[in-house]
Structures are given as C-alpha cells and as structure tokens.
C-alpha cells in the first residue's frame, strides 16, 4: 500500500506494532473522527532481542519507520504508536535416543552393501583366506577376506582352492569388491562385501551367507525358521535367534554366524524421568516410555504448572536452560533478579522420532533406526516489560507510544479483517518456537493459549530423521518442495510432473534429490529417494503442527469441543508454508470447521494480524485520555 | 571403503589400439578417456601411482557397479575438460571419466558445457588407488541414474611447494605428445604380469 | 624394494629427512617457458615510433601485435622518450638503478620509455644484491609497510575481528580477508573493517571475492581497497579467463570512480603453469603484466609470483627472478605489494631466505599477505609466514635493524584490543539486527589462537543475515552509526575518517596508506628519497625503540628481570 493520492490522509495517524518471537510487524493507518480506518502501509522486520524485552525497541522503531517511509510520511505526523502486550516466550528443544541395538559376538552382518556379488545361500565354516589351501576337501567353508586384499588375488585364491577340491560356498570381504570377485570366479558363490571390521568375524564357526538377486530381498536368513533350518536349532534356540531374523528383514544380503551366545538385542536406554506438576498433582513419567506416555501424563496435569527433567540428561539440561534464559531475559539492572524457581515450564510437547545410529558391535557399520523422543518446552512469564519498550519508542520517535492491547485478542481482531470471516473465530498462530491459539466468542470474550513446539521442532525432526546433520539443509527441506533432477534439462517434481528447463541445470544437482529453493535447486545430501524425504518432511509437520493445532484449539474451544468452533484462521510465518495449512485444514475438516490461511486486511496474507488488530481496537475507542 | 592394496604388485598395462573410437549405444557403459601420454610416454602419475593401477582401479570401480568400461585415447588435445567431454559425447550413458598422465581426473557428462563437469579432482598429488576406485564407482553410479555422494576431495597447503612445478612440467610434456588432427582411438588394456598366485 | 637399494650413509639418511627435500625442484625447459629469466627464446629489445605511435615492439611489427603488445605499446610506453631510452645500453640503465648518485626520478625518466624486452635485458644484468640495492631506491613510498591476511577456517566473523585488531596493533597497514563459504562475505568483511579500526585507526581492509561482489563491497564502504584483480602475460591465458587488458582497465576505472584504492595482481609462473607461456621466460611475461598494469593506470601491483610461487621456486635462479619482478614494478613507478604470501617451502630456512630480497631493502608491502592467523585458518591456502612466526620476524627486524612493518606488542595490549574488537562487533551485529554474538564468544575471541578455540556459530542464521546485509544495502556509514550508538565513539570516528578518504581521493595516489593519525602516506608526500648511505628511510628514533622490544629481553640495569 502506498500513500493515498490527494493530499495528507484524513484523521489521526496511528501505528500498530506487533512484536512477535521472530518478526516485528507495523501497520500504519489513519483513523477518522468517526472511527473509520484507512490503512496506509505495513512493514516487517526481524525482532531484535527476546520478545517482550527492552531490546525490542530497535526492531519496533525499524518497522515503524519502514511503514512511514512506504507511506511517504514522517514520525512527526504520528499521533500514537500502539504496542501489543507481549510476554516473553522462550522455547527449547531436546532429543533423547531411547533405544540401542547391540550385536554380540559378531553374530550378524546386515549392513546391506549396495553391490553384493553372486546369489543364493552358502552355509559353511568360516576360514581366513590365507588358510584356504590347507582345508580338507568336501567340507563347506566360508572364505573371510582381510582388508587390503586385491580382487584379482582373492579370485585367484578361491579358484585355486576350488580347483584343489576345497568346497568354498561363500565369501565375506572387507573391500567393495564383491562383484569384481564373483565375476572372476569359475564357480559362482554368494559374496557379501564392505565388512569394514572383517577381522572380528569369528573363525571356525558355522556361518550362512545369503545374497538375493537384484531387486529382491533375502528369504532364508530373515526368517526365524529359515535360520533354524540352516543351523539345526531347537525351538528354544529359534526363539533366541528371532531378533537376528527380524534385524535382517528387507536386506538384499546378510551373513549370520552361529556363535555360543551371539545375539542381537534392542536395549532401552534409561534417560531419566520427567516430573510434571499441575492440577494439584505431581506425576512422573520415564522419558524412554515414549511420546504417547509423556503426552498422556501431560494431559492429566493440565493446566501444567511446571516441569523438571533429570539433571544430566538432554531433556533435563534443556528445561534448566530454558529457565535460565528466561531469568536472564527478565533481569533488569537495578531491580532484584527473578528467582529461577519462579519461572515455570508451562507446556511440553513430546514427539516420537527415530535417529539412524550405528549399531554397537556391528562389523560393517550397520545402521539401525533407533527410537528417540524429541521434546519441546515453553516458558512464559507474566512480567511483561513492554511499558519500557513503549517509553523508549516514544522517546526515540517523538510520538506517544502505549500498550494498545493483549496479543491474542489483537490477533483475533486482525484476523477478522480477513474477507469471509466472522465471530466466533479462532486463530492459530503457527510460529517458530510455539503454536498459539486464541478464540473470540460471539459476545466478544477472548481466551488465548500458547503450546510448545512449532517450526523449529519440525526442522530438528527432519534433520535427525534424514541424518542430515545440517540445519540449513533441514530448514530448506522443510520450507520448499522436492524434485528429482533426471537430466540437465528436466526434473520430476514430487507430485510426479515433469518440468523441462531451457538453461541446463548446474552439475552439482545432477541425478540428485533437490529442494526447489527460490535461488534454484539445492541438493539434499542423502542416500534416500525423494519419496522417503517427502514422507519424513510431511510426517514431521503433521506430528508437530497438526498435533499442536488440535491441542491448542481444544484448550480454547468451548468445553474443549472442536465442533463448537466455526472459523479458524491460520496466521504466522508457518501459515505461509506450502503444505502446513492444508495438513491442518484436513485435520480440522471432520469437525465441520472452516479453516484457512488468513488474509489480513484482504491484502497481507497471514501477516500483520496483531498490528492491524491494534489499530482496530484503537479506532473502536473513540476518545481516550493518555494514561500517566 | 576398502583400501586396495598399497603394495600393489608391479602390474603393467599396455594399450592396444583397435581402431577409431565410435559413439556407444549401450546405456550401461562409462567411457574412460586417456590423455595422449597416459600409459605410453608416461607410466605413472605425479606421485608414482602406476598407470596400470590407476586404470585397473577405475575399471574395477565401474565393474563393481555392474557397468561396463570402454577405453578411448584422445590424441589431439591434452586439455582435461576437452578430453573428458569428447569421451562423454561418445559414451552410451553420456558419462565419462577423463584422466591426464599426471593423475588429474574429471567425471563429465555429455549435456554439460565443455568447461563444466560433474566431479573434478584437480589435486593430482592427492589421488591414490582408493580414490581412483571411488571415481570409477561414482561415474558408474551416475551412468545408472543414481546419486552417489561426491568423492571427498582433499586439500594440502604444502602441495604447492612440492608439486606445483612438477605438475607444470608434466603438463608441458603431455602437450608435446599431442598428435594434431588425429581423432580419438578405441584402445584395449592388456594387463601384464604381477598378479600373485 | 629396500633390499635391492644400495646401502646409504647415515648422513645421507639425515639429509634425506630434512624438510627442504620435501620441496619440488625441476630442470629448466626454456623452449616451453619453464625457465626463470635467462632464455634464448625471449625477444630482443627494439622499438620504432612513427607519428607518435609505436609501430615495432621488441621485434614485432604492429600488424603482428597480439593484444598485450597493442595495449602496452598504446598505453604503457612513453612514445616521446621510447626510442632514446631503448637506445641507452642496458648496462648503463642497470647501473643507474644501483647508483646512489642517480635519483629515483632520473630512473623513471628512462624507464617510462622502455619495452618489456629492454627491461628484461636490464634486470638480467643484475645479481640479487644489485636487485635489492635497486629496490631500496626504487620503492615508491619512503616508509616500508606490511600487509596481513585475516581469515577463518570457519569464516567466523568474531575471529576475523579479533585477529584483525591484533594484526593492526602489530603493525599491518593493510588487512585482507577471503572466505571458505563465499556467502559469509558481508559479515566477515564487516568484521575485518570493525576489528581493524579497533586495533589501529586508519588500517585499510579488503575482501578478496569474485570481481562483482568485491566491487560492490568496496562501493558500499564495507571494504577500503581491492587487490585480487588478476592479469596475465599472454593473450591466450587472458582469453581463457574471459578477459582482456581493456576489461581489467574498465574494472580499475570503476574503483577509481569511487575513490577506492586498488591494485592488480600478477606473478611469474602463472602462464607456464597453465601451459600457455608461448615459449617465453617467466620474467619476460611478468614484465608484460607489469607494463599492462602501468598502462591501465592503476597505482600498484601485487606481484612476486603469488600463487604460482612453487614454479619459480623449483627452477634455477627462480627467486632471483621473483626479486627482479618486484623491482620492475617499483622501477616503473607502481606500488609493489611484494608477495611472500603463499605457502612456499617445507624448510624454515628457505622460507626466511625467500623473503630477504624484499624485507632487507624494504618494499611498499613486504608481504602481500603475512598470515595474521594460524596457517590452518588461512583461506588464501596458507602464507609464507603465519602467527607462529611473529616473534622470529620481530627478532630479524631487530637483528638487522630493518623495518618489516611489524612490532612486538605486549600481551595485555593485545588482549585488550581483541576483547574490544569482539565487543565492538557484538554491538554492530546487535545494532544491525544480525545474529547475536554472545559474551562467551567475546571471551573466546580475547584469548583464542585459531578458529577451533571459538564456540560454533549458527551458520544458517549467519548466512541469512549475510544476505540481509546485501539486501538491506548496509553501507560503511551504517557501521559508523552502529559503533557510535553503542558507545564505540573512537572506533566510529576511525572508520568514518577512513571512509572520508574516498572523497578526497588521497588513497588513489601511488603506494598510499594511512598512518595512525590518518595522514595519507604515499609517493606524493612520502616519496622515496634514497640517495646513498645515510639517506632515505632509516630505522631510528621512536620506531627503532619499538622494534628493539621483544618478548624476552634481559634488562641491562637489572639482569634479574626482563624489559618489556
């Protein structure tokens, strides 16, 4: 919006300023004596400092000046600056891995190398390659080849042994040589390669090596009874090896060595308790019980008064740090410090996730998807320091500045400027650290809640589940759609459509899964295919935003009944996401709710709702005396 | 990754010309393009990796992926990008590996501009047998339409004082072996003795 | 293999293990240009001027000129004096270079008419001591100086700020940075500028980048000069880089139009390294580069082989040629930033010897990048000297009573400067709404050695912020405002004064640097007036007292204590 034509705007100039967790938005309007509002300009900048603290002043001034500049006006014209009553919200994230897979006695090799050699099943006694020449004829042996052996030499050694009558039925290699070796054998055998710690394969033990044809998976070693048949196991022993079979399911190749007490176990790692207080109760839950158990417990102590984690665990450390940060933020020179004990964790969101982790005891860097719990927590305080921000803005801008209203109410007010929306209306502000909901009833009553977990948690889940170890890439995977670059001149989007390009795509994206960022396609450094990346992304969003949308709306809905809501307007940065609004709307559809992304003032999209709400609230109060 | 034996036995290679190079039709081939002096005027890279071993490892990396390797010698240029690009345009899969006598290597693709590449390994002193194996493997994976992780490139600040001048000298010598006007020729690698057992 | 090798003496074994034997050495091959400066394949000097135009240059008729010949003939050679100058016997010109009785101005009157082959003919007559003697007189600025590299392996802006402050305090007149991740550039360039002005007001900074971005940072006043504009000695290498002498001159003019100091970069060995030496010696081709720079009208040149030092370093007489190329830059009245800026040798003895022809006579910048960070953090691929060598350098200055531009600084001063630089950057980041710098990072910066000693930054947030610096069109004046509003009045004042220089244009003069009181020191107001023993720049007075100080010097009045 620009300045209107035909001279200065009529009425008093007011600027609504919304200081949010990540952005500060300003909305400049002229309010005529009759209360009618002409919106003149908006602006958006990054919030300076933690929301609700004096550091916000710089960002607020920048946004105000930005809006004024766009309208071609100066600070001297401003009648009043209206700030939202914002309280600091600090959120934290932590993840605990709660399971661990352990292979004992080097029983199993199940790392699924990309190119095993040969096909079929070979069962025999493990023998080092150097010992092959001395083996008695007729006894099946599995040849174990050390690191550094050349593929030509290995093939020659096996061929020589076979020629001498040694029954070599399979081989296990350290190097990536399986196809090379089998291509050079006179008698084909299954070969599993890339076993980095091949020197730890127990020798002189009965072992089975299985390789499936390309595109197939193994049938015998992934089947408990197959293992029982191969090794001649009794029912008790079969029960014992069933985890081995399970661990090999879906592999194209595998090695199982029968050792006296070899095993694959899935151990739960105790990571301490979470202590939750609320509703007059104190409940404890083990973090390794998983997200469902944690969220059940959280539900039983609503409203949550406080939470603590076990010192020395990630969760405990995170909760303590969130508290400390808040204490620091609330620290004002010349005033007594806020006791950390007074700062309470007001919400916790637990999400089940998994972390690809190297298996302990594995010989070939086997990776298991270990279970993990991600926890988001949020702390807020009632001590707002916005008056200080208002004073500073007033001083530096040379115009009156005051607190114009409470955030949640103002957001609803702004949302009402979205075409097609009416009371009762609920807003969902999908942010970075927290998800906020507010409801305005038909009678004008407003309630608001904040729940922990939003965009940053999604990024963390994407990062760890895809083992990216790069927040920047994870953030891009979250924000932009995927595609597969199929040639330098075309790519296939995640919905299957093909797009041709005039200019050849850059070489570093060739044949890769990419995210389509505004700067062009960027490769996702993963071995996974597009479908897997997409599934992880959507699941992460669902587990955070859909779960939180329902959780937050239930807390504001009359009687906790979602059906009692009519209109839900999505606001905030994550409402601009290309799929989150659809995911939320889909989840709300069964409750008969109209849900969509807000379009504040009919032009601003899901932005500037609070700032516009502040202006509206101001205009509704015709005459006002400046306070104090 | 395995370490193909560091004490590689003294395998040798000789290249037999089998006629003018032609455009391939098999989608499962990678063309390895050799510079004018590779395994001819020169027998080893700047850090003494025998050309026989370089070639064996490149071909092994390709074979392990189930792809076939075809060898071409480019005679009329010693410019790596030109060598690799010429080969890419002859490759049934569109993928090639170009290599200079001193060891500098590049993975190229036919639709790329000549001066571009898929992967470039400019620091010839840092390329050893395992790296050549990985280069072959990656080239084959590109040919299959897979998306391999780029071979990690290394860096060494002290490569300059040690190798910069020798690299320039080898480059000049390679240029001297250019046969202007001769098109690329198909060659066959005949590996000599040295295989243990 | 070992069993078949003949028995070696124990002494040979020791010599074999000496670091110098890790360096590479090659035989000359003049036909291909793999030769330092003595080649039968270089052209013989000649010149013919008709109607005010050069029609023959070093044996080539104008019709056969390549674009280097054309550019040099039309822009670098003074046609009025050319025929007379080239007619002077080379030995006489060489003697003029070393004769204290012949002034620098007298030499320039001759050198402006010389052709590339004639200049080569002159310096070929000079041994390395004579080259040094010539450099002592021909250096444009009377007072020698030094330049530092301030980079970070993690592109950590706080590290760059702290190391820039320390570097400035230790004496570097110019500080240069570059990046691992290029997108970090705006933040690191800001850090370098702020840190530099904390360490010593008036230090000039630059950020080596792709040419367009480098120019933009300069035009915005985030950097103060530019240096990495590469030129080459043959047409074919120029063309390979999609450039011509004219395109480089255009870029030079863009800097000059904003009052920004800049110099070109070239060096022996680059052409043969790329296989396009056209059969000419390394020094002959470098002399063509030097004259091209002269013809483009830039005030100076960074040369001394630079990133190709491994090539001249490996051939016989190579370092003599490198010393000669620095001399040639100075004798055609260009500022010379004289190399010593890239990892050169495994041998500490060779590294030191390599720098003597520049350090002893003094050049405008003895190193055009002494690494003021540990070499592991040096994003220019390592320098000939780094932070570990500070005390050695200071000692050599004191031993020979020469000014290599640095000095020993007490630990408490260094800590104070590093701390202040980190805090100033913290305030600038806060003011510009960039990702915050924590007190822990400030603490780390105060005491750190390398990038490993700092807390990890949130790279994602930093890169976004770096982009926002470009999008929001942040300028040097915004940095001044930020520093002023955060109470760093002195630093703000320093930076503002540096920015003002682009209005006066004083830094466009040859060899210009700024002193601590912001006096531009250049060939105009500090001309080299060397005229034999007892004249020219002499290390004396307050500066000499500074350089007498080392980390450990036993007190003469109380030998039980150390002075310092």
Image (tube, coloured by chain):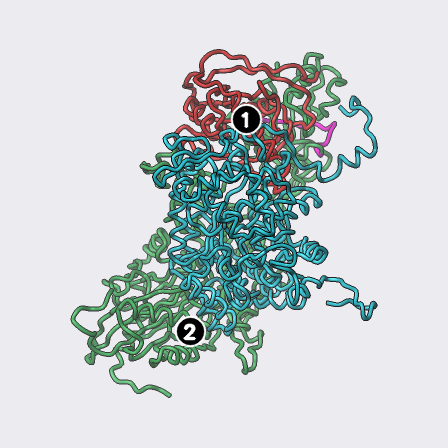
- Residue C3 rendering spot, x and y as whole percentages: 80, 23
Residue C181 in the image: state x and y as whole percent: 50, 49
Q: In the rendered view, tell whether residue A453 sits above or below residue C26.
A: below
For the colour cyan, the matching chain is: C
Horizontal side of C556 relative to A571 (left or right) equals: right
Where is mark 2, residue-wise? A57
- Residue B109 horizontal side relative to residue A273, left or right: left
Rendered residue at 44%/73% (across/down)? A52
Q: Residues within 10 Å of mark 2 (few under 14, many from 20)?
A: many
Disc 2: which chain?
A
Quarter the C terminus of chain A occupies: bottom left
Q: In which quarter of the image is residue C33?
A: top right
Where are the magenta residues, as a range?
A200-213
Depicted A3 relative to depicted A354: above or below: below
The reply to whether the magenta stretch includes residue A330 is no
From the image, state the color of chain A. Answer: green
Quadrant into which the N terminus of chain A falls: bottom left
Vertical order, C342 against C543 (above or below): above
Label annotation for residue A546 = none
The residue under label 1 is C31
Asked where in the image residue A581 lies, by quadrant, the reply is: bottom left
Q: Which color has been applied to chain B in this rendered view? A: red
Dot 2: element: helix
Looking at the rendered structure, the number of numbered marks drawn on it comes to: 2
Asked whether the viewer can see residue B167, the reply is yes
């Amino acid at each position: 919006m620009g300045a209107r034509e035909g001279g200065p705007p009529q009425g008093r100039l007011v600027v609504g300023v919304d200081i949010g967790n990540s952005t500060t938005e300003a909305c400049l309007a002229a309010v005529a004596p009759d209360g009618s509002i002409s919106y003149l300009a908006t602006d958006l900048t990054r919030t300076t400092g933690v929301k609700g603290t004096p550091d916000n002043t710089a960002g607020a001034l920048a946004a105000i000046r930005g809006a004024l500049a766009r309208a071609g006006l100066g600070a001297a014209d401003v009648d009043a600056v209206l700030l939202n009553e914002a309280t600091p919200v600090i959120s934290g994230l932590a993840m605990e891995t709660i399971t661990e897979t352990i292979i004992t006695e080097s029983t199993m090799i199940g790392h699924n190398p990309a190119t095993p050699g040969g096909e079929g099943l070979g069962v025999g006694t493990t023998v080092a390659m150097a010992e092959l020449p001395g083996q008695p004829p007729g006894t099946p042996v599995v040849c174990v080849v050390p690191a550094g052996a050349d593929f030509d030499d290995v093939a020659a050694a096996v061929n020589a042994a076979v020629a001498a009558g040694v029954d070599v039925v399979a081989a296990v290699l350290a190097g990536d040589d399986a196809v090379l070796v089998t291509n050079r054998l006179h008698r084909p055998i299954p070969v599993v390669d890339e076993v980095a710690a091949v020197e730890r394969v127990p020798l002189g033990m009965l072992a089975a090596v299985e390789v499936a044809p390309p595109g197939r998976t193994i049938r015998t070693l992934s089947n408990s009874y197959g293992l029982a048949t191969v090794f001649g196991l009794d029912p008790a022993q079969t029960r014992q090896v069933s985890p081995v079979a399970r661990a090999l399911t879906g592999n194209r190749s595998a090695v199982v060595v029968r050792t006296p007490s070899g095993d694959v176990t899935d151990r739960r790692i105790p990571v301490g308790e979470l202590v939750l207080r609320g509703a007059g109760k104190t409940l404890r839950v083990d973090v390794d019980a998983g997200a469902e158990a944690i969220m059940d417990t959280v539900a039983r102590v609503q409203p949550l008064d406080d939470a603590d984690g076990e010192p020395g665990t990630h969760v405990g450390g995170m909760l303590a740090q969130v508290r400390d940060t808040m204490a620091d933020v609330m620290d004002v020179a010349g005033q007594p410090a806020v006791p950390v004990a007074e700062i309470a964790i007001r919400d916790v969101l637990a999400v089940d996730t998994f972390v690809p982790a190297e298996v302990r005891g594995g010989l070939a860097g086997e990776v298991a998807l270990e279970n993990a719990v991600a926890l988001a927590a949020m702390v807020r305080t009632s001590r707002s320091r916005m008056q200080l921000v208002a004073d500073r803005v007033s001083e530096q801008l040379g115009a009156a500045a005051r607190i114009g209203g409470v955030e949640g109410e103002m957001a609803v007010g702004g949302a009402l400027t979205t075409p097609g929306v009416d009371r009762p209306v609920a807003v969902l502000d999908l942010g970075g650290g927290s998800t906020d909901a507010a409801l305005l009833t038909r009678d004008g009553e407003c309630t608001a809640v904040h729940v922990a977990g939003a965009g940053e948690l999604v990024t963390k889940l994407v990062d760890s589940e895809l083992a990216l170890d790069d927040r920047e890439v994870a953030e891009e995977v979250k924000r932009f759609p995927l595609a597969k670059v199929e040639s330098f001149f075309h790519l296939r989007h995640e919905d299957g459509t093909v797009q041709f390009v005039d200019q050849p795509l850059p070489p570093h994206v060739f044949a890769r899964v990419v995210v389509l960022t505004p700067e062009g396609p960027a490769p996702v450094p993963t071995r996974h295919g597009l479908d897997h990346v997409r599934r992880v992304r959507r699941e992460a969003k669902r587990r955070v935003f859909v779960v939180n949308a329902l959780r937050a709306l239930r807390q504001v809905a009359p009687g906790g009944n979602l059906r009692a809501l009519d209109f839900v307007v999505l606001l905030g940065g994550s409402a601009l996401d290309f799929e989150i609004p659809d995911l939320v709307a889909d989840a709300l559809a069964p409750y008969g709710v109209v849900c969509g992304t807000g379009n504040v003032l009919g032009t601003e999209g899901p932005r500037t709702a609070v700032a516009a709400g502040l202006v509206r609230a101001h205009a509704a109060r015709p005459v006002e005396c400046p306070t104090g | 990754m395995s370490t193909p034996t560091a004490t590689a036995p003294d395998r040798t290679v000789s290249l037999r010309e089998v006629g003018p190079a032609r455009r391939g039709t098999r989608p499962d081939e990678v063309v390895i393009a050799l510079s004018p002096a590779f395994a001819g005027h020169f027998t080893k890279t700047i850090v003494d990796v025998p050309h026989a071993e370089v070639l064996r490892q490149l071909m092994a990396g390709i074979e392990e992926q189930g792809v076939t390797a075809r060898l071409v010698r480019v005679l009329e240029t010693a410019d790596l990008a030109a060598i690799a690009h010429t080969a890419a345009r002859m490759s049934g899969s569109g993928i090639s590996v170009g290599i200079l006598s001193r060891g500098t290597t590049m993975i190229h693709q036919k639709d790329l501009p000549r001066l571009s590449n898929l992967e470039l390994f400019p620091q010839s002193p840092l390329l050893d047998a395992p790296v050549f194996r990985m280069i072959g493997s990656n080239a084959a994976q590109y040919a299959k339409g897979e998306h391999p992780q780029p071979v990690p490139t290394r860096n060494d600040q002290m490569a300059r004082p040690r190798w910069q001048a020798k690299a320039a000298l080898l480059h000049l010598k390679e240029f001297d072996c250019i046969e202007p006007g001769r098109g690329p020729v198909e060659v066959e690698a005949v590996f000599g003795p040295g295989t243990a057992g | 293999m070992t069993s078949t090798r003949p028995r070696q003496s124990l002494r040979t074994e020791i010599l074999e293990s000496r670091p110098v034997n890790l360096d590479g050495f090659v035989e000359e091959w003049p036909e291909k240009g793999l030769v330092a400066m003595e080649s039968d394949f270089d052209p013989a000097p000649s010149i013919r001027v008709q109607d005010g135009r050069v029609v023959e240059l070093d044996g080539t008729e104008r019709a056969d000129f390549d674009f280097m010949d054309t550019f040099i003939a039309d822009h670098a050679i003074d046609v009025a004096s050319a025929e007379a100058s080239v007619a002077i016997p080379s030995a006489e010109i060489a003697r003029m270079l070393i004769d204290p009785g012949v002034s620098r101005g007298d030499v320039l009157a001759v050198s402006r008419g010389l052709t590339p082959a004639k200049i080569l003919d002159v310096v070929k007559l000079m041994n390395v001591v004579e080259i040094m003697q010539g450099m002592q007189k021909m250096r444009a600025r009377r007072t020698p100086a030094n330049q530092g590299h301030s980079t970070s392996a993690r592109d950590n802006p706080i590290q760059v700020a702290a190391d820039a402050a320390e570097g400035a305090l230790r004496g570097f007149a110019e500080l240069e940075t570059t990046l691992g991740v290029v997108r970090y550039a705006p933040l690191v360039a800001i850090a370098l500028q702020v840190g530099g002005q904390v360490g010593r007001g008036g230090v000039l900074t630059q950020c080596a980048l792709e040419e367009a971005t480098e120019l933009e940072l300069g035009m915005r006043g985030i950097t103060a000069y530019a240096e990495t504009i590469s030129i080459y000695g043959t047409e074919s290498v120029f063309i390979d880089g999609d450039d011509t002498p004219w395109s480089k001159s255009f870029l030079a003019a863009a800097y000059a139009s904003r009052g920004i100091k800049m110099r070109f970069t070239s060096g022996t060995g680059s052409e043969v390294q790329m296989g396009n030496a056209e059969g000419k010696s390394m020094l002959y081709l470098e002399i063509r580069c030097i004259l091209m720079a002269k013809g483009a009208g830039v005030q100076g040149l960074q040369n001394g082989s630079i990133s190709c030092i491994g090539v001249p370093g490996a051939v016989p007489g190579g370092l003599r040629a490198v010393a000669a190329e620095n001399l040639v830059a100075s004798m055609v009245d260009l500022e010379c930033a004289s190399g010593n800026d890239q990892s050169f040798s495994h041998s500490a003895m060779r590294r030191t010897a390599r720098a003597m022809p520049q350090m002893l006579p003094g050049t405008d910048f003895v190193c055009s990048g002494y690494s003021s960070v540990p070499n592991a953090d040096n994003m220019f691929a390592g320098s000939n000297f780094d932070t570990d060598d500070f005390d050695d350098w200071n000692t050599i200055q004191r031993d020979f009573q020469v000014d290599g531009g640095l000095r020993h600084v007490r630990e408490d001063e260094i800590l104070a400067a590093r701390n202040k630089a980190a805090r100033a950057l913290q305030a600038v980041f806060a003011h510009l709404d960039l990702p915050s710098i924590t007190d822990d990072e400030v603490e780390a910066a105060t005491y750190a050695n390398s990038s490993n000693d700092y807390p990890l930054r949130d790279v994602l947030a930093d890169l976004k912020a770096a982009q926002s610096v470009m999008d929001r069109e942040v300028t040097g004046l915004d940095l001044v405002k930020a520093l002023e509003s955060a109470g760093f009045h002195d630093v703000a004042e320093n930076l503002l004064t540096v920015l003002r220089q682009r209005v006066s244009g004083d830094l466009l003069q040859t060899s210009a640097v700024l002193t601590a009181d912001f006096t531009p020191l250049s060939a105009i107001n500090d001309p080299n007036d060397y005229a034999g023993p007892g004249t020219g720049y002499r290390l004396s007075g307050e500066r000499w007292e500074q350089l007498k100080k080392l980390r450990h010097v036993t007190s003469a009045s109380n030998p039980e204590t150390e002075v310092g």
